[in-house]
Amino acid sequence: LYHFELSGGRFLIDAFAVRNVAAFINFSCDPNLEPRRLDALSGDKSLPRVGFFARRDIKTGDELGYRRDPNATTRKNRSGS
């Protein structure tokens, strides 16, 4: 279960039973993707979806990532990286 806060509201995503390729996108401090709210294909506003869109050009082999919480601050880990 993942909690998203995007413009337009808060969303809970439960991919326990049904997943797609988005399950392989990682969290990143330097993301190349940005999540955006999308309306359901049916037009039902009570069933929003989340789509991931490129923030910049992505080369073949680049890891896909998005920022988990846009308001979070980053800090270095103990190894200094």
Image: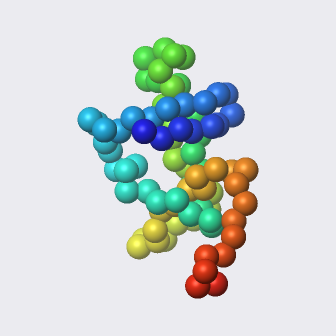
* Closer to the camera in the image, 37 or 9: 9
Left or right of 20 in this view: 63: right
Left or right of 44 in this view: 8: right
Q: What is the quadrant of the C terminus in the image? A: bottom right
Q: What is the quadrant of the N terminus in the image? A: top left
Q: Tell me which residue sits at (47%, 60%) in the image.
A: 26
Q: Can residue 38 be seen in this view?
A: no
**Number of numbered tags placed on the structure image:** 0
Q: Tell me which residue sits at (69%, 65%) in the image.
A: 74
Tell me the colour scheme of the image. rainbow
* Closer to the camera in the image, 5 or 52: 5
Left or right of 71 in this view: 64: left
Quadrant of the image occupied by residue 36: top right
Q: Tell me which residue sits at (51%, 26%) in the image.
A: 48
Residue 46 point in image, percent of width and height: 51, 16
Residue with the most extreme front position:
78
Residue with the most extreme left position:
17
Residue 14 point in image, percent of width and height: 39, 35
Residue 39 against residue 55 in the figure, above or below: above
Residue 56 against residue 62 in the figure, above or below: above
Quadrant of the image occupied by residue 9: top right
* Closer to the camera in the image, 46 or 39: 46
Residue 8 point in image, percent of width and height: 67, 28
Residue with the most extreme bottom position:
79
Q: Tell me which residue sits at (47%, 21%) in the image.
A: 47
Residue 63 against residue 27 in the figure, above or below: below
